[in-house]
Image (tube, rainbow, N blue to C red):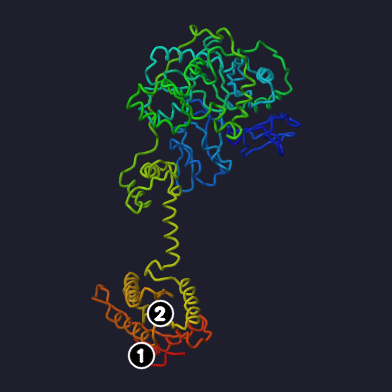
Amino acid sequence: MSMINIQVMRSGPGSLSPFRAGGGFGYVSCIRAGFRRVRRIPGVTIAVCLTSQERNGFLGLRFSINDSCTSCMACVRVCPVEAISVSGQTVEIVEGDCIECGLCVPSCHHEAIDVVGDFDLCRDTLSTGRAVLILPSEANVYFYPATPEQILNACYETGFSAVYYEQLGDELVAHEYQRLWGNEPKRAWLRSTSPIVVNYCRTKLPELLPFLAPIVTPAVALARYVRQIEGAETRIVYAGVGAPGFNGDRDVFDASISFDELEALFESTDVNPLDQPLTMTRMPPERRRHLSVAGGLPRDMLEENRQSSSRFRKERGLESLAPIARAVLGDESSLGFIDIQPFEGNLGHPAYGPPEDLYWRKDLAELLELSPSAEPVVDPESAPDLSISFDQVVSESASVEPAEIQRILDLIGTTPDGRAWNTGSCGHSTCIEFASAVARGRSTLALCPIYLGRQYQRAARDALHDSLTGAFTFRVLTERLDEELSRASRTGTSIALLFVDIDKFKPINDNYGHATGNALLVGISEILHEAVRSTDIVCRYGGDEFVLILVNPDRRGAGRVAEEIRENTEAFKVPVPEGEVGVTLSIGVAYHSGITQSNLTREELMAEADASLYVAKAQGGNTVHPAIGGQLVR
């Protein structure tokens, strides 16, 4: 699973099929591989996890970007909390801002997202002989076709002194939700069993914090319960696809690992769950439920309140939280209890596997679930305190000046009627939000299709126009000249080509500087454009040369245009410290009439114009050749 660092999967085709593989551990996985260091065993590919490290006392999996990153920015687009920083082509996940939603993992098609837990710390914990493992029920799906009994035996064989299934935590939390439901039935409450939802609210929607049910996650509830009954010296390890809780710090857990890393622990001790006995070798932990469903809600609450209930609402996806915030702040009594989750439970977590296999995983989990117990499986009266309060998390990204945000908005531009585009294609709902993220280094303009479109238009325009004078480039000259010669031959129209050269331009640059030379070039370009019609073409041919294509002029008209350009340029001056300076032009004219039907090529017409320019320069410059009234017709 590129999604959770170490993966065991069948080699060859059919790796998603629910069958035992031919050799090795042979688990069937719905998770993509994607790691840099890979080790082979018969029939199996195992990507070995990277070394983990602690971060500010917080317990959970760490998301990072490896060297396979191509800076495609797909992860930046999907991150809901702007936890990915962008600096040029460097993309990094900001650990303190990441809520571990896992959306970046399936969005990356380059296997550039690493997700690791406390693998080394877990091994150290095992060496104490007092390590207790908490397993969610999703482990039965991950390690299929190994049975739950084989998985538990493998955990004991690896060195864990005890194993608890998270169902007990679900039972503890369900009792608290039932009490909350009965005590304040008309108040709006948000389900808080998902650390992703809680951390999203803490980061993006702090106004929802008072509405979050003040109850810990099932994993945290079970960890507190286990520490209470096993003793303070017990070392607790959590294995799963995500963080065990938004408050899952080192006071609750000692280590957190992924299923992949648990599998690596099995391998490191030469333990294969598929080789374990089908019956328990020790007293089995309680796996049945009495009150709860997976995730910690009371079964009675779900059965009593269907989708049409005004007291109970089911929402999925973090995008539902913003409308919920607007609703509860307006009239909280109308919403009741909101069963909000980012996905369809942990089985729907992006780091667990492709979404197309979700219902296969759910069906398998349901088949492996034991029948509910008629009696309570845990005494809620003996449970520890399961309450919690939520505080706002302030992002580590720096604030930016409004002027910088406005500068970015100006680069994006507006619709023809002056409004913001707000397409959402950048991953943000508004252009202002996107511009703020770009200014803070949490996004990039490369994600804005409007900006990219404008950049493309500018690049296309720059490829056709000289950046200094605005005249067309040589590429346009050759293309249009071929077109006009072809048209003249077909329709019997005419075409004139004017080669324009600035007399003694180099001394201007040498004596007055290139700024003065550029000012003269710009002014002459304006004179050329003013002298021709919209159907004519003005092109820059070289440093101090221009070429004009006059479409269907009469033979005297071409000479008059050339003479008008020469006179206006002679009168044009630019200021210099010593006063004013100007230049003159030499212009060579070549003329072709389609009536003669001669097969004249572009190269031949340009050679004739160039020869006429050479004669004009030889005559001392500041002249047009052929002169008005001369022989212009071929």
Query: In which quadrant of the rendered image does the N terminus lie?
Result: top right
Q: Residue at x 36, y 78 (%)?
A: 505
Q: CA distance from mark 1 to mark 2?
A: 16 Å
Q: Which residue is mark 2?
A: 550
User: Residue 554 lies in what quarter of the image?
Assistant: bottom left
Q: Are marks 1 and 2 in contact (CB under 8 Å)?
A: no
Q: Is residue 271 visible?
A: no
Q: Position of residue 431 (x, y in %)?
A: 37, 45
Outermost residue on the front side: it is 308
Q: Is residue 336 left or right of residue 373?
A: left
Q: Residue at x 49, y 20 (%)?
A: 217
Give amino acid for label 2: Leu
Q: Residues within 10 Å of mark 2 (few under 14, many from 20)?
A: many
Q: Secondary structure at mark 1?
A: loop
Q: Is residue 45 left or right of residue 197?
A: right
Q: Which mark is residue 628?
A: 1
Give amino acid for label 1: Ile
Q: Position of residue 137 (x, y in %)?
A: 59, 21
